[in-house]
Amino acid sequence: MLSTEARTGAPPDWSIVDVVVPRPSVWLPGVSMAGFSQHVPAFVDMAMVAHPSVTVLVDLSEGDGILYGARGRHGHGSFVVGLAPVGVRAAGRVGSCLQIRLEPAVAAAVLGPVGGLDGRVECFEDVWGPGAERVQDELRAAGSWDARFALAADILRRRMADRPPVDPEVAHTWRATLAGRGRVRVDGLADEVGWSRKRLSARFHAQLGITPKRAARLVRFDHAAHLLAAGLAPAAVAFESGYVDQSHLHREVKAFTGLTPTAVADVPWLAIDDVAWPGSSPSRSPGCGPRRMAAPGRAWNR
């Protein structure tokens, strides 16, 4: 399990972390990447907040690196987190790490069917399979973040080419859920793809590791969480996100994080999203590039 130091460590100080994002030429559909380099050694400990993607964290540090744990599972080094994780924490003195967010349909192509992840945290080597150690060594040896992003994109592209895609009906259902910010009806989505609700739910869960209904809840929660982090009042967020009322928002936030909406607004994991994932947060206008945070972490394309 995480050490006493990890359990009681401080939240990250983003002012000592350089955040690097890929150039547009490295873009892959359904894939987002960001590099983190801690230029002043310090021990950090933070909770990961559920996001509508499968998260791959490649530890590029020397020494002990990242410690992680959730649901009684724990380890150190690179790891993979399934959709809607519960109680995932990452800690340690992390020199550098590469975080990759994979939309579920892309994750299924890169990692194989992700139903087994089901919101859990797993060792990167166990999920990736043969060649995992070589991939990490090559990423560590890359001479710059530009080279590292290009290498990661090439590796992901080759993995996607080697595996069949998810069912078009499953992919459409996920895209429609994202486009609707989770405010969708499963019956309506099933009608759109010409399947029964039962068949859609079974295929969706088998291939993406989550039911369509829970996927919609996760996407809606993510939108609400970023609005809270942007400073909107819970009542306004409940209305904007389509919850019945503020109590409904409170229950959903509690279910996904164990926290109140007010507490989620201050979670460090969300505070970096505007920098690490430019344009991905509801608090930003589409098409905006990276910016310096008010409590500054530094974001560069390079």
Image (cartoon, grey):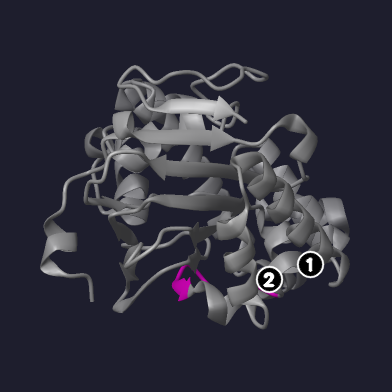
The CA distance from mark 1 to mark 2 is 8 Å
Span highlighted in magenta in the image? 113-122
Count neighbours of disc 2 (C-alpha within 10 A) and say few if under 14, some if 14 to 19, many if 20 or more: some
**Residue 50 seen in the current view:** no
Instruction: Give me the residue at 78% from left, 55% from top.
Output: 154
Quadrant of the drawing holding the N terminus: bottom left
Asked which quadrant contains residue 156, the reply is bottom right
The residue beneath circle 1 is 159
Which of the two labelled residues, at mark 1 and mark 2, occupies the earlier sequence position?
A: 2
Q: Where is residue 114 drawn, in percent x and y?
A: 63, 72
User: Which label lies toward us, 1 or 2?
Assistant: 1
The residue beneath circle 2 is 111
Q: Are marks 1 and 2 in contact (CB under 8 Å)?
A: yes
Q: Where is residue 119 drawn, in percent x and y?
A: 47, 67
Instruction: Give me the residue at 53% from left, 51% from top.
Output: 98
Count neighbours of disc 1 (C-alpha within 10 A) and say few if under 14, some if 14 to 19, many if 20 or more: some
